[in-house]
Amino acid sequence: MKLSARNALTGKIESIHKGAVTTTVKVDVGNGIHVTSSITNDAAEDLGLKVGDAVTAIIKSSDVIIGK
């Protein structure tokens, strides 16, 4: 699979929480860093996601907001 996104972080699924419409997927990408993604329930089911699965978090964004 080729993508236009340049930021890809590999890791393992740490948790999955299914809501009414979306599923939240928390990915451990190492060094104590986690990335959380909100995807549709249909997408989560199509991918067959399970805790412990090796996945890639692909980040495509023109803005990065930092707060303190």
Image: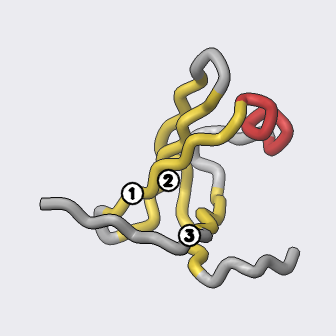
Q: Which residue is mark 3?
A: 61
Q: Secondary structure at mark 2?
A: strand
Mark 1 or mark 2, which is nearer the start of the sequence? 2
The residue most toward the left is: 68
Q: CA distance from mark 2 to mark 1?
A: 5 Å
Mark 3, Cα crowd under 10 Å, few <14 / some 14-19 / many 20+, is few
Badge 2 crowding class, 10 Å Cα cut-off, few under 14, some 14 to 19, many 20 or more, is: many
| Residue at position x 40%, y 70% in the image | 64
Nearer to us of marks 2 and 3 is 3
Which residue is the site of mark 1?
A: 34
Q: Give the residue number, with chain letter if any, for mark 2.
A: 27
Element on which disc 1 rests: strand
Q: Is residue 20 left or right of residue 67?
A: right
Tell me, yes or no, whether the two marked residues, 1 and 3, touch with CB atoms within 8 Å: no
Quarter containing the C terminus: bottom left
Mark 2 and mark 1 in contact? Answer it, CB < 8 Å: yes
Vertical order, 3 against 42 (above or below): below
**Residue most extreme to the front:** 63
Residue 28 lies, in percent from the top left, at 44, 57
Name the residue type under label 3: Ser
Q: Do residues under tags 2 and 3 come within 8 Å of each other at their CB atoms? A: no
Give x and y (percent) for residue 32: 29, 63
Q: Position of residue 47 (x, y in %)?
A: 80, 44
Q: Amino acid at mark 1?
A: His
Give above or below for 66 relative to 28: below
Give the mark nearest the N terminus, 1 or 3.
1
